[in-house]
Image (cartoon, rainbow, N blue to C red):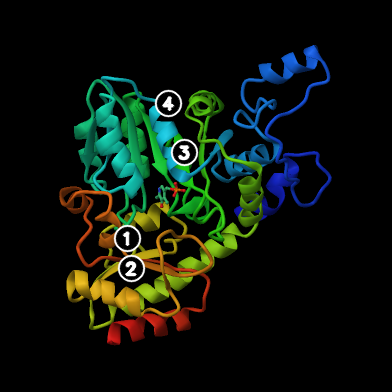
Amino acid sequence: MDLQSLVIHGDAAAHDDSGVAPAIHPSSTFRARGAEEFADMVSVPRHARYYARYGNPTVQRAEMLLAQLEAAPAALLLASGMGAVSTTVLAHVRQGDHVVAQSSHYMGTTRLLTDLLARWGVAVSRVDQTDTGAFAAAVRPNTRLILVETPSNPTLAITDLAGVAALARERDITTVADNTFATPVNCRPRDFGIDLVVHSATKYLGGHSDLVAGVVCGEEAAVERIWQDSIVLGACSNAWDAFLLLRGLRTLPLRVERAGATALALARFLEGHPAVARVYYPGLESHPGHALARAQMRGFGGVLAFEPKGGHRAAQQCVSRLQLAANAVSLGGVETLAVHVGSVWEGSLVPEQIEQAGVSPGLVRVAVGLEAAADLVEDFGRALET
Ligand SMILES: *Cc1c(COP(=O)(O)O)cnc(C)c1O
């Protein structure tokens, strides 16, 4: 089924509930009608339905739809994107192991790699994600995991998913791809041989800036293992967010396609603007990863970044002068958001970490929403003029 139809019908097909809209099951605990039934309830490995940290019917509905969208047999919904990234990574490593990751990752993932894993005796090599050979060169005998994120946050660099998946498979290393920016509408990493796909469902999957959630999709046995650790780590999702997510997913392809078309129009406008030094958008022919993005993505997504001439100060001024685009972090909602990346990262990372991630002092990230392209072009044009 085409993704557009899957988001409408994939959920209903997986359930015998007659409600056209999904039911919300807020209960934190579930009653058995006797000792035998209770024994049955607790013995189901995953989706055990006797306590909501182990499983919840509304959460399970969202998981079943998300798995289908990522062409995976199973999915686990978690409390946030970082809940999904951290639980997935921690479920795979122990003291003495080694992880290969990119020099540029989402800020929280960067902290997991550079701070938490080091504290637990897990070594991490971070490589230039645009160079598949660099991943191969970084692999050691004790490498357990390769983590990729494409396009990456916030520089929109592209990783060759098939290339990394192939070199990992040869060496029996598990691959994890953060597919938050692309969404399954534009890219399905498992089609290229990636094992596990994680998302911040807070972004495009939810799509309305009103929930926080994360998901990991993969083979049943792998998801089951992550679930076992998730029960202990405790980053479980809940019925309310799962319901909102199911609602948001119904329009995922429509939203992602429109945001992508508008992002391309805005990127072209910014690239031609005399006050702009550089634009980062994989849909532009000038982007170093354009050919690869064209080969492994159906569309280029709704996020772009640019540097106004004048560095740090000019970037802050430009963001302050935007009227339509809100000065806020996050992405994937219906409203356009713009943020001076340095101002966010400086709060959590040291300058060397920021530089290693390729974040220049004047970088502005724009998460394009669903406003008309002409109105956004006018807003950015006005902000850059002054
Ligand atoms: C936002 C984001 C995350 C973290 O997700 P939360 O839901 O905020 O925890 C992880 N990866 C990427 C690429 C993101 O954009």
Mark 4 and mark 1 residues within 8 Å of each other at the beta carbon: no
Q: Earlier in the sequence, mark 4 or mark 1?
A: 4
Q: Residue at x 56, y 27 (%)?
A: 220
Disc number lying in front (4 or 1): 4
The quarter holding residue 249 reads: bottom right
Q: Amino acid at mark 2?
A: Leu
Tell me where residue 40 appears, x and y as whole percent. 74, 16
Q: Residue at x 76, y 46 (%)?
A: 23
Q: Amino acid at mark 1?
A: His
Mark 2 and mark 3 residues within 8 Å of each other at the beta carbon: no
Helix, strand or loop under label 1: helix
Q: Which residue is mark 3?
A: 84
Tell me where residue 50 appears, x and y as whole percent. 69, 25
Q: Is mark 3 within 8 Å of ligand 1?
A: yes
Helix, strand or loop under label 2: loop
Tell me where residue 78 appears, x and y as whole percent. 53, 39
Task: Give the Cα distance between marks 1 and 2.
Answer: 7 Å
The quarter holding residue 41 reads: top right
Task: Give the Cα distance between marks 3 and 1.
Answer: 29 Å
Task: Give the Cα distance between marks 4 and 1.
Answer: 34 Å
Determine which of the numbered discs, if any, sits on residue 290 in the image. Answer: 1
Q: Amino acid at mark 3?
A: Ala
Q: Is residue 161 above or below residue 362?
A: above
Mark 2 and mark 4 residues within 8 Å of each other at the beta carbon: no
Q: Which residue is mark 4?
A: 91
Q: Is residue 354 left or right of residue 9?
A: left
Helix, strand or loop under label 3: helix
Q: Is mark 1 within 8 Å of ligand 1?
A: no
Determine which of the numbered discs, if any, sits on residue 284 in the image. Answer: 2
Quarter the C terminus occupies? bottom left
Mark 1 and mark 2 residues within 8 Å of each other at the beta carbon: yes
Task: Give the Cα distance between marks 2 and 4.
Answer: 38 Å
